[in-house]
Amino acid sequence: MDITSIEYELKAWAPSEDRLTQLLSEFKKEGIEKFQEDVYFDTEQKDLFKHGVFIRIRNGKLAEIKYNPNKSDSSHLDCEETRFELPFTLSGISALRVFLEQLGISDKGIINQDDSLSVLKSFGLYTFVTISKKRTVYTKPGVEFCIDFVEDLGRFIEIESVNQELSNSYQKWANNEGIKPIPVGYVELYLRQHDFPTYLTGRYILDEDRKQP
């Protein structure tokens, strides 16, 4: 089944262990630490990244499109998220085609519907960035507090809420607790280290980098 939803997410560098323990005191740990590998795809010209569009496959089992249609919003807090079970269904391919055509990207004919990489390649999408991380999840009603250890980048927290009201509430909570959100994602942080020129072409960049001549 293909599902579209709104995601409200606050990302920040993880505080010290003692501080993190304090912040998590009201949350319940869910399960054990899990490994996630997110493979992001883009055109050779990085057209998706420039528009702030992220298409990824998680652990080889789920494809996702993440995009905020409000182009004036550079906060990296809200986005529409569409998930596709793999292999792609005919309706999933149709939805992907409609979305990409809005960006001027069309397919060259899909040869093998059951091969997810082949489907993406038919749209001219190739492996762009791979983000590997270990995630531990803590919850409260309507909220997930995630601790991510991201390979090559460090440790982060993500606070994911189910609606705008809760998101606003936790933004205020984070501010009161001295947590400063990062207005970029892991892909931008990776590119900032490994491909700075491409990073600067993206929709989301850090304020200190916007000030560079």
Image (cartoon, rainbow, N blue to C red):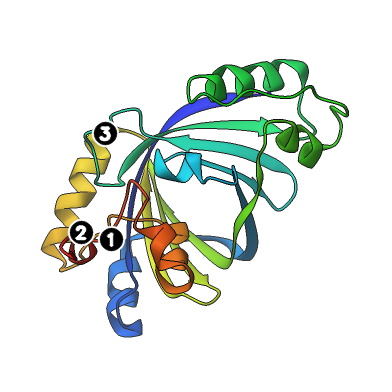
Cα–Cα gap, marks 1 and 3: 18 Å
Amino acid type indicated by mark 3: Gln
Name the side, left or right, on which 141 lies relative to 46. Answer: left
Label 2 element class: helix
Q: Residues within 10 Å of mark 2 (few under 14, many from 20)?
A: few
- Which residue shows up at 38% across the image and 64% down it? 157
Name the side, left or right, on which 155 lies relative to 165. Answer: right
Q: Are marks 1 and 3 in contact (CB under 8 Å)?
A: no
Residue that sits furthest to the left in the current view: 176
Where does label 1 land, which residue? 182
Where does label 3 land, which residue? 164
Q: Quadrant of residue 159?
A: bottom left
Q: Position of residue 91 (x, y in %)?
A: 70, 15
Label 1 element class: loop
Q: Quadrant of the C terminus?
A: bottom left
Q: Is tag 2's residue or tag 1's residue first in the polypeptide sequence?
A: 1
Q: Please state which of the two labelled residues, at mark 3 or mark 2, is closer to the viewer.
A: 2
Q: Is tag 1's residue or tag 3's residue first in the polypeptide sequence?
A: 3
Q: Quadrant of residue 116?
A: top right
Give the number of marks.
3
Q: Position of residue 140 (x, y in %)?
A: 38, 50
Label 3 element class: helix
Q: Are marks 3 and 2 in contact (CB under 8 Å)?
A: no
Q: Position of residue 38 (x, y in %)?
A: 62, 55
Cα–Cα gap, marks 2 and 1: 14 Å
Where does label 2 land, which residue? 210
Q: Please state which of the two labelled residues, at mark 1 or mark 3, is closer to the viewer.
A: 1
Cα–Cα gap, marks 3 and 2: 28 Å
Q: Residues within 10 Å of mark 1 (few under 14, many from 20)?
A: some
- Which residue shows up at 28% across the image and 74% down it? 22
